[in-house]
Amino acid sequence: MAAIIALLKALARALRRELRTFLSFKLNNLFLLAALIAYSAIVSGLKPWAATPFFLLLGSLMLFPMSSDPLARIPASRLALWPLSTRQRVALRLASVGLSPILWITLAFLALTRRFAIALLFLIVALTAQGLAAIGTRAAAFKPNLDPLRHVPRFPGRLGGLIRLNLRQLLSVLDFYAALLLAISAAAWRWFGAKADPEGFAPLAMLIALTLSTGTQASFGLDSDAGLTRYALLPLRGWQVLIAKDAAFFSLLLVLILPLGARAALGSGLTFGMMAIALGRYPSLILQPAQHRWRFAAGDFRFGAAQIILGSSMGFAQFRISNWFLIAACAVYLISLLAGAWYWDRVNRPENLLDGSRHPEPT
Amino acid sequence: MIECGNVSKRFGRLTAVDNVTLRISGGVCALLGPNGAGKSTLLKILTTLLSPDSGTVRIGGADIFKDPLQARRIMGVMPEDLGLFDSLTIAEHMELSGPIYGLSPRETRERAAQMLRVLGLSAAQETFLDQCSHGMRKKTALALALLHNPHVIFLDEPFEGIDPMASRTIRELLGAIARRGVTVFFTSHSLPIVEQLATRTLLIRRGKIVWDTAGAPATRPLEEIYFEFFEPSPTEELDWLQSSPS
């Protein structure tokens, strides 16, 4: 029994640490927008229904990583090697279910509302999400070509390989899937909606750009220390490294918003995108917020708010007033690229790697 | 050619590299020393990854402080952390690196295919790095270091964690490369491999080069010389490990 308790304690600790990574959504721009909408409704004396679809979108995507098997945190080889009897293994399996965050959420919901049907529905949805994720993972392990990330094309040119790498990183955070769902819904509304109003396309393009925008604050977040070492070794200037990151973001953004029409995509959507990258440059290079795969991107609150406010202001101004705002956004983007490139080149010169902070351990 | 003069690096109170001066022109040079002796720190300094507190470094004639890009262009490096991206496959790493060093896509493809075949990675070339074994990751990093046919090669512990067949292939490959005039500098813990491969051997202790075969070629076995400088830790404290298993 002591062995099982020790294992469950370690498992609970690992899960607690992992749960912190789920909290990244709190500093995600889509969540900030939803919170702002909800807050505005509440202070106006209304019920915050307008924010509900956004919260549902965030919550439903988080179900996929959240509903995974708690026991999967223990390396399979380690679990197999521990001298546990079959009874102990069964006990561990059953007890580990109690550590699932999905179970706690369901129990908390039940305790607060006593609505069994909804709690049961939530459990079924979570288990379905887990089933789909498990099937996807196994299918990709069995037949690697089934992994969609494998089919990200290599772009031409000297930086083509880097653009593919960055694109693949963007596809491995949940922001992309939220943006994809929004883009599909928006395109379906445009093409099949009986009364699709063209005035709505530009705001939708900006909403999709906003959903993707948090990642621009953590664009080096998925490059591990080893990846940063490779960047430092490559004979590339700062602007080349940054342009490879930006090209991946812009290509993904354009694929998602072009179905809304060239005017909305190349106008407001692109204006928002350029402002988002320009404002995300400082945190991505200097603050370097942590980023985890299959979580929502998290940034810095100040820069997230600036991206939402300035990005949408410039986007709406481009849409309502003049294309000069697109040119202004382009200028802001270019200034951020030059400043970021200057910073990158400075940091990656050997005489400026002052304290070895990127490689702190002497061996 | 690797030239460094009076290079020092401190981490707080620890002197990781202490006033090292070296001039290595061609051949295979091995840097030996126990963990924490300063091998990897010196390698990071020579490969532009870490700034020394003082001293000068030139790689192939390029001053790494004045022209780091030129130095990076002419060197091939396998760093301590291997410098690989988990979300790329082995083949995609080659496709990423080749064009950055000026190879055409066709040249990159051909060289990568040959390199992966020689290193026994052909069958696994479509595997993502986060699914590769340590040995496969190491071979990938080695392939990346060699792909652009560099003038100077730096390898941090290239033989550790590699199967004997691949180890032999790598030894032969490095020997052949060095005979063309390329300078190969590597760190290792494997004394037999160093004895077989290196044309020059350096011993580093507490950041100082304490022995260098450039001045006086070794006439005794390397192991004997090594243990003159480094004493193994006593094991008496672990007497419970020497009693019967519980």
Image (cartoon, coloured by chain):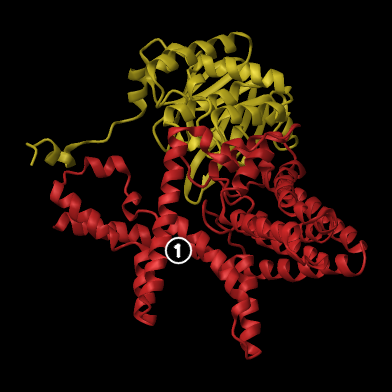
Screen quadrant of the N terminus of chain A? bottom left
Could you tell me residue A218's position as x and y percent? 62, 55
| Horizontal relation, residue A64 to residue A314: left or right | left
The amino acid at mark 1 is: Arg
Label 1 sits on residue: A20
Q: Nearer the viewer, residue A185 or B5?
A: A185
| Residue shown at 54% from the left, 68% from the top | A56
Chain of the residue where label 1 is placed in the rendered structure: A
Q: Nearer the viewer, residue A37 or A301?
A: A37
| Residue shown at 35% from the left, 53% from the top | A69
The chain shown in red is which? A
| Residue shown at 21% from the left, 57% from the top | A6
Could you tell me residue B123's position as x and y percent? 48, 21
Above or below, B196 against B95 in this view is: above
The chain shown in yellow is which? B
Could you tell me residue B121's position as x and y percent? 49, 21
Q: Nearer the viewer, residue B141 or A201?
A: A201
Screen quadrant of the C terminus of chain A? top left
Above or below, B145 against A200 in this view is: above
| Horizontal relation, residue A106 to residue B93: left or right | left
| Horizontal relation, residue A132 to residue A242: left or right | left
| Residue shown at 39% from the left, 62% from the top | A124
| Horizontal relation, residue B29 to residue A277: left or right | left
Circle 1: is it few (<14), some (14-19), or many (20+) Cα within 10 Å?
A: few
